[in-house]
Amino acid sequence: EDKVVQSPLSLVVHEGDTVTLNCSYEVTNFRSLLWYKQEKKAPTFLFMLTSSGIEKKSGRLSSILDKKELFSILNITATQTGDSAVYLCAVSFLDSNYQLIWGAGTKLIIKP
Amino acid sequence: NAGVTQTPKFQVLKTGQSMTLQCAQDMNHEYMSWYRQDPGMGLRLIHYSVGAGITDQGEVPNGYNVSRSTTEDFPLRLLSAAPSQTSVYFCASTPIDRVNYGYTFGSGTRLTVV
C-alpha cells in the first residue's frame, strides 16, 4: 500500500532556531514530491522535487529529495513566528496524473 | 480576488440531511478536485474533474456526488450525511499541464454532522 509518513507530528521551537521536517514515502511509480504550507486554512505550494540531491530554495526555506532512501527534508532557518503552520508533503505518481498521496502533516509552532 | 472560492465556510447537518458544498474558480483551470482533511490523516481525494462534463472518483468517493457543467464550478453533494463525513473539505484547482503540483486551494468548509 502506498504511504507517505511525516515526522515529527508536531514541533515547538523558539524564534531563530533552525528546524528540519521529514517526509518519507513508500510508493510505486514515484513521480514527484511536493511540499505545502497550511496556515489557518488553505494549503499553499512551496516546492516540487523530482530529482535526488538537487536542493530547492526559497528564502529561508529549502528542501531536498533522496530517491534512494525514499525521503525528503524541509529545512527552515532563522525561524519566525510567521513560519508557524502545518507543513504537508504529498507524492504524485507516474501512472496517475490525478492522484496525490498526502502525509498527515507536521505542526510547527514557533515561540517568540 | 482571483482564486478558489468555497461556500459555506461552516455547516452543521443532521444525520440523513443532504447538502451541496460549492466551489468556484475564476482562473480557467481545467482540473478541479475535492479533498477531505481529518485529524491525524493526510488529505484524501474524494472526486476530481479534468474538464466540463468529465468527473472521476478519487480515494474516498462513497457518499458524495459531483458534477461539472462549467469550467468554473465544481459542487460536491452529500446525499445523506453521516457522522463519518464530519471533516474539513477543500476544493483545489490547477491547469491541466500542472496537475502534479501547484494546486490552488480554497479556504475550506468545516462540516459537522450530528
Image (cartoon, grey):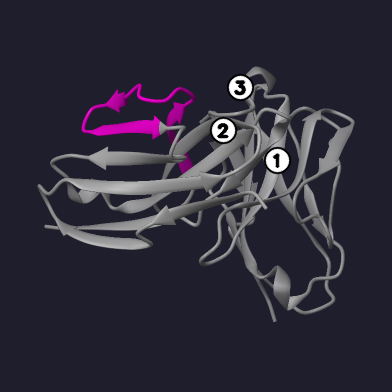
* Residue A57 screen position, x and y as percent: 29, 25
Residue located farthest toward the bottom when viewing the structure as drawn = B114
Q: Dot 1 falls on which chain?
A: B
* Residue A47 screen position, x and y as percent: 42, 30
Please give the residue where the numbered disc 2 appears in the rendered image. Answer: B103
User: Are tags 1 and 2 found on a single chain?
Assistant: yes
Q: Check if residue A61 falls in the magenta segment.
A: yes
Q: Dot 2 falls on which chain?
A: B
Q: Which mark is residue B33?
A: 1
Q: Residues within 10 Å of mark 1 (few under 14, many from 20)?
A: many
Residue interval drawn in magenta: A43-65
Residue B26 sits above or below residue A40 on the image: above
Q: Is residue B56 left or right of residue B104?
A: right
Q: Of A29 and A69, which appears nearest the observer? A: A69
Q: Dot 3 falls on which chain?
A: B
Q: Which mark is residue B98?
A: 3
* Quadrant that contains the C terminus of chain A: bottom left
Residue at x-position 57% and y-position 52%: B108
Q: Earlier in the sequence, mark 1 or mark 2?
A: 1
- Residue B113 in which image quadrant: bottom right
Residue at x-position 65% and y-position 22%: B95
